[in-house]
């Protein structure tokens, strides 16, 4: 099997209007039955820096989320937050879920006040699953082409 076909893709923050002095609406991801999680924060055009870019976790769906300190962009020892010149760039998080992670992971992103603001989309890829996805739906796809 092709390794990329053994993954599940989940959109956590839909593409939408520019955020200006606002936080992105982001869903949590249930990591049950998966051993690895990759999350990409994809920035479009921006004229404002991000004020928040991090991951949080909880054992319960919908509440009790706390920061995962190693994933807070801009924190001491971590990479800097994206600035106002970070147009069309991608920022990544790579988590080994076997390392005592909580079941639910939720990114957080916010954009500072600018003339227009910035565009943010967040996508997650689950891999090393206990069950291998076998069709488009179980891979998180509307449809796929396989050659």
Image (cartoon, grey):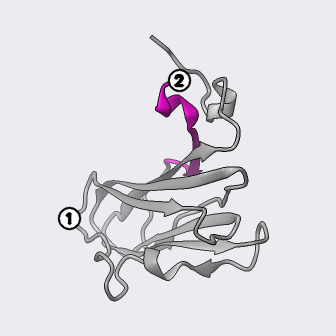
Q: Residue at x 58, y 45 (%)?
A: 128
Range of magenta residues: 1-15
Apparent side of residue 86 relative to residue 20 in the rendered image (left or right):
left
The residue carrying mark 2 is 1
**Would you say the residues marked 1 and 2 are in contact, meaning their CB atoms lie under 8 Å apart?**
no
- Per the image, label 2 sits on a secondary structure element best described as loop
Task: Identify the residue at the far left of this view.
Answer: 85
Relative image position of residue 13 (x, y in whole percent): 55, 54
Residue at label 1?
85
Q: Position of residue 83 (x, y in %)?
A: 26, 71
Q: Is residue 132 left or right of residue 75?
A: right
Count of numbered marks: 2
What is the quadrant of residue 36 in the picture?
A: bottom right
Q: Nearer the viewer, residue 22 or 51?
A: 51
For residue 100, above or below residue 13: below
Residue at x 24% of width, y 62% of height? 86
Tell which circle, 1 or 2, labels the residue nearer the N-terminal end. Answer: 2
Residue 74, position as x, y percentages in the image: 34, 81
Q: Residue at x 76, y 75 (%)?
A: 63
In front of the other: 23 or 91: 91
Residue 5 highlighted magenta (yes or no): yes
On the image, the x and y values in percent for residue 18 come to 42, 57
Structural crowding at the residue carrying mark 2, measured as other residues with C-alpha within 10 Å and reported as few (<14), some (14–19) or many (≥20): few
Say whether residue 134 is left or right of residue 91: right
**Image quarter hosting the C terminus:** top left
How far separated are the C-alphas under marks 1 and 2? 40 Å
Q: Is 11 drawn above or below residue 97 in the view shown?
A: above
Q: Is residue 121 above or below residue 101?
A: above
Residue 76 colored in magenta in the image = no
């Amino acid at each position: 099997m092709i390794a990329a076909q053994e993954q599940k893709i989940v959109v956590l923050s839909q593409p939408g209007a520019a955020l200006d002095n606002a936080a992105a609406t982001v869903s949590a991801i249930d990591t049950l039955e998966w051993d690895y999680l990759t999350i990409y924060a994809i920035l479009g055009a921006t004229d404002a820096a991000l004020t928040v870019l991090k991951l949080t976790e909880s054992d319960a769906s919908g509440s009790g989320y706390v920061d995962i300190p190693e994933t807070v962009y801009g924190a001491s020892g971590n990479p800097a937050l994206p600035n106002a010149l970070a147009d069309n760039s991608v920022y990544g998080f790579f988590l080994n879920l076997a390392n005592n992670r909580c079941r639910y992971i939720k990114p957080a992103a916010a954009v500072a006040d600018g003339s227009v603001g910035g565009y943010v989309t967040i996508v997650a890829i689950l891999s090393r699953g206990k069950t291998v996805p076998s069709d488009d739906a179980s891979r998180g796809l509307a449809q796929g082409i396989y050659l």
